[in-house]
Image (cartoon, rainbow, N blue to C red):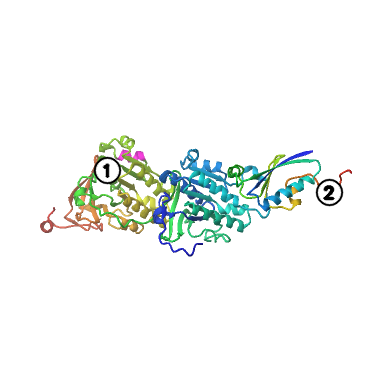
Amino acid sequence: MSGTETRQELPRLATGLRGFDEISYGGLPAASSTVVSGSVGSGKTVFALQFLAEGIRQHDQPGVFVTFGEPAEKMRRFVVEFGWDVPAWESEGRWTFVDASPGVEDSAVIVGEHYDLTVLLHRIASAVQRTGAKRVAIDSIGVLLSRFGDVEAVRDVIIRTTAELDRLGVTTVITLSRDDEREPMRVGVEELVVDNVVLLRNSSVEESRRRTLEVLKLRGTRHRQGCFPFVIDRTRGLVVIPLSVRLDQPAMSHRIASGIDGFDEMTGGGLFQSSVTLVSGSTGTGKTTFVLQFALAGADAGEPVVVVGFEESREQLVRGMAGWGHDIPALEASGMLRFVIDYPEVRTFEEHLVRIQGAADDIGASRVVLDSMTSLRRSGPTRSFNEFAIGLTAYLKDREISGMMTTGQASLVGSEVRATEEHVSALSDAIVLLRYVEVYGEIRRVVAVLKQRGSGHDKAIREYSITGDGMHIGAALRTTTGLMSGRTSQLDALESARVSEMFPEP
Amino acid sequence: MTSYRFRLYVLGETARAHSALEQLRALCDSRRDTTYDIEVVDVHAHPEVADDARIVATPTLDRVEPPPLVRVIGDLSSDQLARALELPPGHNSGGRPT
């Protein structure tokens, strides 16, 4: 509409919607209007409501909500679900509803011709001035259009209203229905305020619901391209998953204790803080023990930890830690330990991610362990799983949280990493293998550090044992070769002595 | 004898507001056994009234009495308006003893 303007980067208004400000590089253009378009059930009303709620909660910016569809009373009940105390904000004069809904008693409404919708502009402007509003949400144009067939009149009042709101320095979100997921904009109103457009989609992928958000355009400003998954969480509202790992991460330097006897020596003094470690092993090798010990070592050091479990119940996990001398309920009560236990299938990947992030945020976690990626992997589409892995890694890196995840191995021996988990392997900073090997006709368990970013590490393959108080890493198996392939053979004593001389143990 | 109470919401003293009021008056005057009262509300001066009544367009005409509320938005022909407001037949519609 204002094609003659040559402004460069416009000032942004941080919305406070999680993940959205990241993908839009800072939020919505300030003192400007943005259309949020989506089909029924795509989450656009939640977007509009939360835009106002976060304005009040995070930025002390009062807001006006204009509702054409549902009456204000219904909106008040709806937002309670998310824990936003709109009635309190209303009584403080920080939130005002402009109720332009048809209303229940208006069953007998006859719409003639030549009406003027200017009164809407007056009501909205009056509410903005009364409230001192910095944000306005208008929900939704589609409903207004269906009540008043005169597209011209609707377009006219919306254009005049947004112009007035821009002039008042207010940042506005306008929701617009889309009948068809594939159609970018409803025909007839595309000449509206389309300098800034955000699209919400709700589609079905491999029988799994998938919500995505795309910033189609923002006037004079840069933003990330593409569709980003999001969830609507009962307590956090709309959460966008930015799907990228920050490139400006500080270099890892601080090493942390693993709590596993002998393991820190293998990693050159300990894993790095805010690194992500993958622990790979077949069933019974002790991966769960490994990550639980790592978790409790964090709690011992005063670093809050989140234990995410997809395979065992909280009780089973607690029983596994029984001999280690920790008062688990006390750690939970003090906020040092939080369990997030779920069946993988009960939520989408995005919902799992948001739940894990929520728990980690609640306790200010320094460590997050997850057991196991393999169980989770089986519960949904590959693409969504990969996005989960990226999203979780990005989150951990962003908060400088140390992560450790287990992954299963189909065969009992050998070193193969399953194709479906290659993605996870590539994202991780360190990989630890726990394996069964056969040595002189006996099954032994060995551990190896396969990779560790930014540090030297033990190249030896070491035997370990699990006793009542956890895992103990022992000596390198130097007389055995072929451990990684699972086809082992023994060197004779002379040869092994020669090798020992060439590569003395540190 | 039926008593009607109307509220007409207008935005400023415009020609459109004026003609809506005139049309309603003429219509009511032409009805038999009818008394009526019209309250004109200028929502430009009283936006809070528009909020309470959820007015989104002008002119909006509410038939407040008798209940239930009937709301007419915009212009209708006099015949359509009489039907919408459920007014009794007019003087010229026959059947009235002279």
Q: Amino acid at mark 1?
A: Gly
Q: Which residue is mark 2?
A: B93
Q: Residue furthest right?
A: B98
The spot of residue A133 in percent (x, y) is: 48, 47
Q: Which residue is mark 1?
A: A298
Q: Residue furthest front?
A: B13
A190 in relation to A47, above or below: below
The residue segment tinted magenta is: A314-320
Q: Using the image as rendered, state which of residue A55 and residue A214 is in the foreground.
A: A55
Q: Determine the secondary structure under disc 1.
A: helix
Number of numbered discs visible in the structure rendering: 2
- Binning the other alpha carbons within 10 Å of mark 1 as few (below 14), some (14 to 19) or many (20 upward) gives many
Q: Does any portion of residue A71 appear in the rendered image? A: yes
Q: Chain of mark 1?
A: A
The spot of residue A442 in percent (x, y) is: 22, 50
The spot of residue A237 in percent (x, y) is: 45, 46
Q: Chain of mark 2?
A: B
